[in-house]
Amino acid sequence: MSDQHPSLGVLQVSVWRGGAHGEFQQFEVPRRDSQTVLDVATHIQRHLDPTLSYRYACRVGMCGSCAMTVNGVARWTCRTHVARVARAGRIELAPLANLPVVKDLVTDMAPFFDKWQRAQGRYAGATGRHDPVARVDPASPARRAADAGIECIGCGVCYASCDVVSWKPQFLGPAALNRAWTLVNDERDTAGARRLAAVAGDAGCHACHTQGSCTVRCPKGIAPTAAIAGLKRVTARAALRGELDGTEDTVQDRAGRDAGVSEVLP
């Protein structure tokens, strides 16, 4: 945010400080034209309190790392203008819900990505780099289903917005299940049975209450609720055919061993 622009008044900002048992601190920030919420956090850190911790990278809606809770709603702060969210000249900034707070507005994303691991959210192919490139019909129903969720960048907004995660912390969450759905529909992938078993357990797709908060809040316009509904149908059919028998326990045991792995391929 440039301080060369004329001020349009003063914005009262409440910012969460500390860890899980911290408190809100009040700041006054000059209002600017076309000011984003990320601009506000940056002004506080650069001009008022250099100890403020927050996370961002691209500033243009590509990385998702700037996600925070703004007035009680999870949002990308780089794409959220103050004019849209300020209430009587006030805004409240807090860390994302459903994730451990590291400090101030920074959360630990490891549990979020660990659940991608538990949902078998990694592509498993049968070919190598020297094999011919697989041809996938872009108009096929499976490819179109995968395309609907493939643009997820793992920002965590849907996860922070999910009430089921709040009630049931072991729930895999909408992002991990959306990722699993895209891979279920990838005809090149070879881990279909393992993946269906991983998402069919008590913490998987059937734990979703279909409230739709993830779909409403997704900044990319993805519908994780639809992906989860697809997983419910596919896993139910697989269970009726006996294709999940003897597989789920093995997958869940492996998931438990891998629970500490946070470097997961998106």
Image: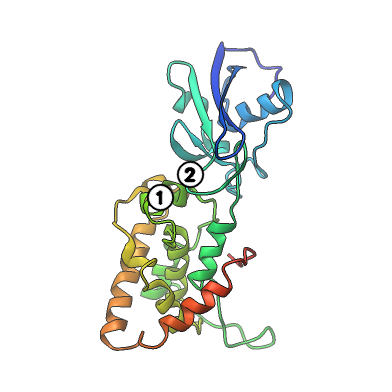
Q: Residue at x 36, y 49 (%)?
A: 163
Assign the N terminus to one quadrant of the image: top right
Q: Residue 4 location in percent, x, y? A: 71, 17
Residue reaching furthest to the left: 240
Q: Residue 45, located in which quarter of the rendered image?
A: top right
Q: Residue 202, located in which quarter of the rendered image?
A: bottom left
Give the residue at mark 2.
Answer: 97
Tell me, for residue 166, which label it has, or none: 1
Q: Mark 2 and mark 1 in contact (Cβ < 8 Å)?
A: yes
Above or below 4: residue 180: below
User: In this image, 60 relative to 246: left or right?
Assistant: right
Assign the C terminus to one quadrant of the image: bottom right
The amino acid type, in three-letter code, at marker 1 is Ser
Mark closest to the chain's N terminus, 1 or 2: 2
State the residue in front, 24 or 206: 24
The amino acid type, in three-letter code, at marker 2 is Ala
Above or below 222: residue 11: above
Q: What is the count of numbered marks?
A: 2
Q: Residue at x 65, y 88 (%)?
A: 131
Few, some or many residues within 10 Å of mark 2 (<14, 14–19, 20+): many
Question: Circle 2 sits in a helix, a strand or a loop, which is it?
Answer: loop
User: In this image, 204 relative to 67: left or right?
Assistant: left
Asked whether residue 48 appears in the rendered view, the answer is yes
Q: CA distance from mark 1 to mark 2?
A: 8 Å
Q: Residue at x 35, y 87 (%)?
A: 245
Question: Circle 1 sits in a helix, a strand or a loop, which is it?
Answer: helix
Q: Residue at x 43, y 72 (%)?
A: 143
Few, some or many residues within 10 Å of mark 1 (<14, 14–19, 20+): some
Above or below 261: residue 214: above
